[in-house]
Image (cartoon, coloured by chain):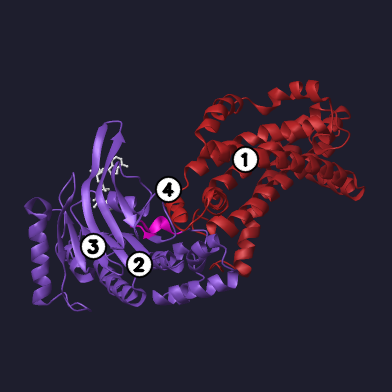
């Protein structure tokens, strides 16, 4: 049995202007400890799908099963990292943000701070434990968000373009760091992106989606040794393959390379 | 966090800024007094006002008036703060509470507080009790409005993050909604206390309370004690300024400004 099963998942948004399909009949599986990237052009339904898996939205058709059980809402088995830096609580320090989940669970103060400090070490921010988010750069804030989502030890990490708003240099660093964190924690990760190079760098497998109204087009396993070299011929071959799958209509939106995002 | 202006220079600057309005008003006052436009009895020079201030303070009369007024202020404001924040949060969180309260609040808010005074006195009698109720009632409006706005302005992504991390409704309220809405709530409280202060002094004149700064000023009129009136007005301004600068500004500095949710 796969860790997560996505079965015929559809969602239609009801808007004043009419019914808008968010995602259509998506089907795929994720193995435990697998790093899966959801790749697709803007507006194809990646965030919608991720929010359904997170339990924030209920699908209008199909279902998600985690460990064989149907998902009915959000739960501590899934940690979520959003694209928006503003996801951190500005009234809590970096440490206070990371302890939040443990605090909700009722873990005693000293214990939760020890755990949180370890998570901050993992993302190399232990020196900034007592800083408030507004004193941290965008990249640092996203690292805190990752530490925060890992702190209560969910089996699954759901990430929606967490680095898309960062500059190219910082994003490269973040991707390296995330690959390291994943190697150490072995979480099941679903990572949304519309950046082809990012997908090839991070993923065990890439689920490519069609343009809006989106569904799964094809799954591409990335069989490259880690850490990956973005300049190797094989890496570039995978990028070309993904771009071909995205199709000519998508190449304007989905980006190849890291400079023009 | 130490700012670059801390130290002797910064403190001097802060002092100058605080003293500035008093100096300007004092100078203008003195000028008019000396020009003799009004009889000195009605427009006494500063030293007489100062003398009255000292005399009344030493005799314990002014402190007693101020004390009674402050008690009413805090009692009324406490009612307004608790009720206002509660109603505002209910309106922000529940559609039904919004439908019920918003029309009522919208009608009540633009009416000047003093207009309610005769009604309150008929209902609750003259004296402290009705004064406190009226102050609470009137100053609740800005608190309700701002709290409501603040709760609506709490970012959805904070709520989602907290829920993803297992926060139940109570935790969500205490750990996210309240701090998330705090910049607005503080603004509301600040406006509320200013409102309370203004209405309180007026109502003290009408409600025939035995002590209070409003009463002191009103009573002094009968004997043409303009120096006493001015001493009273001075204390009112001083207390208002202290609340604003030292209570609320400090509260903001330690919370929302420190968190980067409001510019200093
Ligand atoms: N809250 C909403 N109400 C109505 N329609 C929505 C809503 N959210 C998304 N949609 C629509 O659903 C479709 C999928 O949106 P979604 O946000 O999932 O795309 P995405 O793949 O994440 O895009 P991007 O890469 O730009 O983030 C879009 O066509 C969008 O217009
Ligand atoms: Mg999206």
| N-term-proximal mark, 3 vs 2 | 3
* Label 4 packing within 10 angstroms: few (<14), some (14-19), many (20+): few
- Gap between marks 2 and 1, in whole Å? 38 Å
Percent x, y of residue A136: 42, 67
How many marks are shown on the rendered structure? Answer: 4
Could you tell whether B203 is left or right of B25 in the image? right
- Gap between marks 4 and 3, in whole Å? 25 Å
Residue with the mark numbered 4: B156
Residue with the mark numbered 3: A37
Is residue B39 visible in the rendered structure shown here? no
Residues drawn in magenta:
A80-88
Residue with the mark numbered 2: A139
Which tag is nearer the camera, tag 4 or tag 2? 4
Which tag is nearer the camera, tag 4 or tag 3? 3
Residue at disc 3, secondary structure: strand
* Label 3 packing within 10 angstroms: few (<14), some (14-19), many (20+): many
Q: Give the vertical position of B42 relative to B173 (above or below).
A: above
Name the foreground residue: B67 vs A231. A231
The answer for which chain carries disc 3 is A
Q: Give the vertical position of A12 relative to A226 (above or below).
A: above
Colour chain A is painted in: purple
Residue with the mark numbered 1: B86
């Amino acid at each position: 049995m796969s860790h997560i099963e996505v079965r015929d998942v559809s969602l239609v948004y009801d808007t004043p202007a009419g019914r808008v399909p968010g995602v259509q009949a998506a089907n795929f599986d994720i193995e435990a400890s697998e790093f899966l990237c959801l790749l697709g052009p803007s507006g194809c339904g990646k965030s919608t799908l991720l929010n359904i898996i997170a339990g924030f939205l209920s699908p209008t058709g199909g279902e998600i099963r985690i460990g064989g059980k149907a998902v009915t809402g959000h739960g501590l088995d899934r940690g979520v990292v959003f694209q928006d830096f503003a996801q951190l609580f500005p009234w809590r320090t970096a440490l206070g943000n990371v302890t939040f989940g443990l605090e909700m669970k009722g873990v005693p103060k000293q214990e939760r701070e020890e755990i949180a400090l370890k998570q901050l070490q993992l993302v190399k921010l232990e020196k900034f434990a007592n800083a408030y988010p507004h004193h941290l750069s965008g990249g640092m804030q996203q690292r805190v968000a990752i530490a925060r989502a890992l702190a209560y030890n969910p089996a699954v990490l759901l990430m929606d373009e967490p680095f898309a708003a960062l500059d190219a240099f910082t994003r490269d660093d973040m991707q390296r760091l995330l690959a390291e964190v994943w190697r150490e924690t072995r979480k099941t990760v679903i990572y949304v992106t519309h950046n082809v190079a990012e997908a090839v760098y991070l993923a065990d497998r890439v689920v490519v989606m069609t343009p809006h109204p989106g569904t799964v087009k094809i799954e591409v396993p990335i069989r490259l040794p880690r850490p990956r070299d973005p300049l190797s011929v094989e890496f570039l071959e995978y990028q070309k393959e993904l771009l071909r799958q995205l199709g000519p209509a998508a190449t304007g939106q989905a980006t190849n390379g890291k400079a023009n995002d | 966090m130490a700012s670059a202006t801390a130290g002797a220079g910064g403190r001097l600057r802060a002092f100058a800024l605080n003293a500035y309005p008093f100096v300007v008003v004092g100078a203008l006052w003195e000028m008019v007094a000396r020009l003799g436009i009004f009889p000195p009895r009605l427009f006494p020079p500063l030293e007489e006002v100062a003398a009255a201030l000292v005399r009344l303070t030493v005799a314990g009369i002014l402190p007693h008036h101020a004390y009674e007024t402050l008690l009413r202020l805090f009692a009324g404001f406490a009612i307004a703060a608790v009720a206002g924040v509660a109603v505002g949060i209910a309106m922000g969180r529940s559609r039904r509470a919004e439908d019920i309260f918003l029309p009522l609040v919208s009608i009540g808010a633009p009416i000047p507080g003093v207009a309610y005074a005769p009604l309150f006195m008929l209902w609750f009698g003259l004296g402290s009790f009705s004064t406190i109720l009226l102050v609470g009632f009137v100053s609740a409006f800005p608190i309700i409005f701002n709290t409501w706005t603040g709760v609506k302005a709490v970012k959805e992504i904070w709520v989602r993050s907290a829920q993803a991390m297992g926060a139940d409704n109570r935790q969500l309220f205490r750990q996210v909604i309240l701090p998330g809405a705090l910049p607005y709530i503080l603004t509301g409280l600040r406006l509320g206390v200013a409102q309370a202060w203004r209405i309180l002094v007026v109502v003290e004149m009408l409600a025939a309370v035995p002590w209070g700064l409003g009463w002191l000023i009103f009573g002094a009129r009968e004997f043409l004690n303009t120096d006493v009136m001015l001493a009273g007005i001075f204390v009112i301004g001083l207390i208002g300024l202290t609340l604003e600068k030292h209570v609320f500004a400090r509260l903001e500095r330690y919370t929302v400004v420190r968190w980067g949710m409001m510019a200093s």
